[in-house]
Amino acid sequence: MTSSLRLHSLACGIAVVICSALLGCGASPTSNGPVAGSALSGRLKGGQNPISGATIALYEAGSSGPGAGAINLTLARPPAPTDSQGNFNITGDYTCPSGTTQVYVVAQGGNPGLSGSINNSAILLMAALGDCSNLSATNYFINVNEVTTAAAAWALAPFLAPGGVVGASSTNATGLRNAFINANKLVNIATGTAPGAALPGGVTTETAKLYTFANILSGCVNSDGTTACNPLFAAATVGASVPSNTLDAARNVVLNPANNVGSLFMAVPAHVAFASGLSGAPHDWTMSVTYTGGGLSDPADLALDSQGNVWVANFGYFPGGGAVTEISPAGKVQSLTDPSLEESFGIAIDGSNNVWVTNEQSASSVNSGAGSIAEFNSAGQVMTGSPYTAGGIDFPYAIAADTDGSVWVADYATSTATHLAANGSSLSGVSGYTSSDLDYVGSVALDAAHDAWFGRVEQNQVAEVTATGSTISAYSCGTACGSTESIAIDQAGDVWITDQEGSSVVELGSNGAKLQTLSGIGGIYTPQDLAIDGSGNVWLTNLDVPVSGQPYSISAITGANSGPTSTAISPASGFGMDAGMEGPHGIAIDSSGSVWVSDSSLNAVTQFVGLAAPVATPLLGPPKQP
C-alpha cells in the first residue's frame, strides 16, 4: 500500500464549494484553511470477526488526477496495529489542507481470528470518511469492514486506482466531494451497516445487494488469504487485471458490473456475515439510489448544476402551476412550485447556474397558451422578465444552454427554432428561425461551434442551425431515425440520435453523414433519451421492455472514442434491472460519474452511483471531463 500512495506532503488548493441556496449541499465545510487533525478511534472487522494486527492509515485524496496523488496523513506517527478486538486509534498528529479535504481510512492485512500467527495479506478494506472537518465531531467513530469497502468502491469508482489510491483532477474537487457523500448515503461509517445514517426519508438504496457483495468479500477476508480468495479473485478478473486483495477485487467488479455476475454470487460463503443479502444472483452489480417526493410528477428531462444538484422538469399538473424538483448531493429532495411552470418537459442550466425550463403549454393569458420558457436562479427565485415568449416560442419541448449564457429552444408546434439571450430576449428575431426542415422538432443539442442540432419527431431527418441562424441544413438518416426522441453531441462532434420506434441509436458525423445504426445490443429497446459521458460512451434510457413483466433498464455503448463501430458496455438486457424502474425517461451524468434517470411512471429519480465517466456540469455544448 505504501509503495502505491504518495507519502510526501503536497501543497493542495482549497476547494471552495458554493451550494444551492435552496437546498444546500449536506455537510457544510467549516474551514477553508488548514485543519488540525483530531484523535480518531475505530474498529476493524471481517464480517463480525475482529481483525488483529492490521495496518491502519488515514489518507487525503489526491488532486493530481483520477486515482492519483493520495497522501498518507499518518506517516509521521503510524497508528499501532489493531488489537485483539480490532480496535485502533489515530492520534491528532496530522493536518488537512482544508475542512473540505476528502479523507479515507485504509486497513491492510491482519488476522481475522484464525489460530496462530496468520497474516492475511489479501485483506485491503476501506472507509470513505469525507470532509476532514467531520473528524472533529464529538464521538466520531470509524467502523471499517466489507460493507464500508463495498460502498466506497461503488461511490469512488471513477476516482479509485488499484491499491486504494483515491484522487481527482484539481478542477473536480466538487465531483470528488460528492462521491464521498454518495458513499455515506450507502453506509453508516459509525456502525458499518447500510444504509447511511443521514439518508433522507423517501430515499432508498439496494441494501440487500450491498450486503451480498460484502458477504462475498468476507469469504476472502475471513481466511488465510489463499484458497478461500480464489473464487472472488477469479470472478473479479478483467483481462490482465487479476486482483490480489479485496479492495482491488471490489473495484474491478463495480467498474465491470455485468462481468461474471453468477460466478461472483456463487462466491457468497455458506455462513454469511451479513444476513440481509439477496436470495439469488442480481442482474448486475450496479448500485442505485432512488428518490421520491419533492413534487416529482411525470418527471421528464433533468440537468445538473456546477455543485451537483439535480434539477428535474415535471410534466405533471399541479394546482396553480407546475413544479421543478431539486435533489441535493446529500439526497435532500425539494420542489420549486410556481405559476409560470406548466407541463414542463425540457430543462437546462447555464454557466451561472440559472435554471431554464420549457413549458409546453401555458395559461391562455401567456403567449395565447402556446407555452413559454421559465428561468430561475440557483436559489429558486424567478428571474426578472420570466417567463419568456420571444423568438417564436410555440409549444417548446427541449432546451440547451450555450457557453455564452444563451439558450436554444426546440419549438414542437411550428417549423421554428428559438435562440434566446441570457436576459430572455430573442436572438432569432420575432418569429424565430423558420424552415420546413424544423417541423416537429423535439430535441436540441449544441456542438463546439455553437451550432444547434435539432431532432425531428416522426421524421427521418435532423436539422443543423448555425450559431447566427444564417444557415439551416437538413440531414437524412433514413428510416433509422423515424422517431427521433433525443439528440446529443459527443467530444468528436458526432451526433447521436435515439429512434424509439425502430429501437435503435444512430450516429451521424459532424457533417451530417450517417456513420452507423445500432440495435439489438446492450439491451437497447425503445430508447428515449441519451447522454454522453466524459469518456465518450453513450448512455440511454429504455422507455419500454420487450417482454411484459421484464424489469426496465438503461443501456450503454461505446462511442466515437472506440473507433468506427460501437460495442455494448451493458449486458444484453441492459443495466439497472434491479433498481425497480418502470418508465426510464431523462438521463444525465454528473461530475462524480453517477448516472441520473427520471422515471415518468413511478414519479421518481434513480441515481446509479459511480457508473460512468464524470462530466463537467452544467452541460454547455459537448460534454467535457471535469
Image: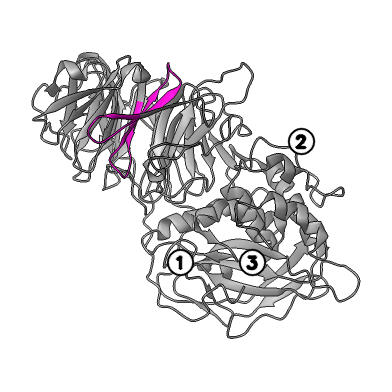
* Residue 603 visible: yes
Give amino acid for label 2.
Gly
Task: Residue at 55%, 30% (x, y): give it.
Answer: 553
Q: Which residue is labeled 1 in the image?
A: 30
Q: Is residue 495 magenta?
A: yes
* Label located before the other in sequence (2 or 3): 3
Between 575 and 100, the residue placed more toward the observer is 575
- State the CA–CA distance, disc 2 to disc 1: 44 Å
Q: Which residue is labeled 3 in the image?
A: 140
Q: Are marks 1 and 3 in contact (CB under 8 Å)?
A: no
Above or below 501: residue 354: below
Give amino acid for label 1.
Thr
* Label located before the other in sequence (1 or 3): 1
Q: Is residue 333 left or right of residue 234?
A: left
Describe the element under mark 3 as helix, strand or loop.
loop
Q: Are marks 2 and 3 in contact (CB under 8 Å)?
A: no
Q: Residues within 10 Å of mark 2 (few under 14, many from 20)?
A: few
Give amino acid for label 3.
Tyr
Whole-percent x and y of residue 412?
26, 18
Describe the element under mark 1 as helix, strand or loop.
loop
Query: In the figure, residue 112 lies in which quadrant?
Result: bottom right
Q: Is residue 381 left or right of residue 214?
A: left
Q: Which residue is labeled 2 in the image?
A: 280
Whole-percent x and y of residue 165?
55, 66
Q: Name the mark on residue 236.
A: none
Please tell me how many numbered marks the rendered image carries: 3
First to last magenta residue range: 486-515
Q: Split into 4 quadrants, where in the image is the C terminus?
A: bottom left
Q: Split into 4 quadrants, where in the image is the N terminus?
A: bottom right
